[in-house]
Amino acid sequence: MKPLTTMAVAAVVLALGYGAADAQNGRQIKDDRRDVRQDRRELNRDNREVRQDRRELAGDRQELKEDVKAGRTGQVKQDRAELRGDRRELREDVRDRRDDRRDLRQDRRDLKDRDIKRDKQDVRQDRRELGRDSREVRQDRRELVGDRRELNRDIQAGRTNEIRQDRRELAGDRRELREDMSDRRDLRQDRRELTRDERSR
């Protein structure tokens, strides 16, 4: 093969290699963006489910209080069973939300090296999520204070069954508060990492 022909063949092979690499990189960016959008949709669904679970839990607590006051023992048992189910659903949904947040963080990390603009949007999204998580933490603290007050009233009145129930509710409230505070810490950490990455560019 003549040297000129060899050089031409080598140049074509090199150009094809670069084109394939660019196409591969473009596909990766597209896949990462699709993953992030999917993660956000799942996270939004999880957030809606967690909020719905909390509303149902609050409603069931109210029903239980009314049934206890009215002395409807059969209904009280049923209310307590529903509360246990609601708490179980809430724990599962909070766990799903945490997993989806972890996936979202990982997909954002995959994407951040390829798309600076997307990082800025992520920071704004994290700020919104952080604000919502802070509101949830404040709500959890209010519920904790209310349950403590209720426990003290039941202790003073000597209502032993209600005291056990109040203590279980307090334990659940504390768990929710810890989970929300953990989520808030994770989001703050993500925001610090994204800000640091933007500055280093």
Image: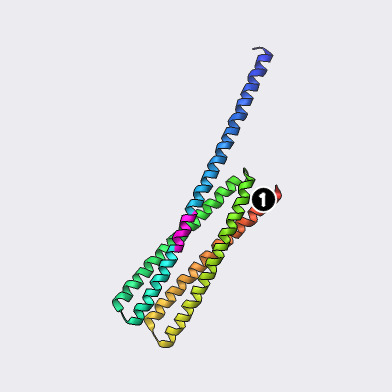
Q: Whole-percent x and y of residue 80?
A: 35, 72
Eyeballing the image, is 57 above or below 26?
below
Q: Nearer the viewer, residue 50 or 81?
A: 50
Magenta stretch mostly in which secondary structure?
helix
Left or right of residue 176, residue 23 in this image: right
Eyeballing the image, is 57 above or below 151?
above
What quarter of the picture does the N terminus occupy?
A: top right
Q: Whole-percent x and y of residue 199?
A: 70, 51
| Scheme by which the image is coloured | rainbow
Magenta span has 10? no
Q: Whole-percent x and y of residue 126?
A: 58, 56
Q: Secondary structure at mark 1?
A: helix
Question: Amino acid under label 1?
Answer: Asp
**Rendering quarter of residue 78:** bottom left
Q: Residue at x 43, y 60 (%)?
A: 92
Q: Which residues are magenta?
A: 43-51
In the displayed image of the protein, which residue is found farthest to the top? Answer: 2
**Rendering quarter of residue 68:** bottom left
How many marks do you count on the picture?
1
Q: Residue at x 41, y 87 (%)?
A: 157
In the displayed image of the protein, which residue is found farthest to the left? Answer: 74
Q: Circle 1 is placed at which residue position?
A: 197
Q: Residue at x 59, y 52 (%)?
A: 122
Q: Residue at x 49, y 55 (%)?
A: 44
Crowd around label 1: few <14 · some 14–19 · many ≥20 (10 Å): some
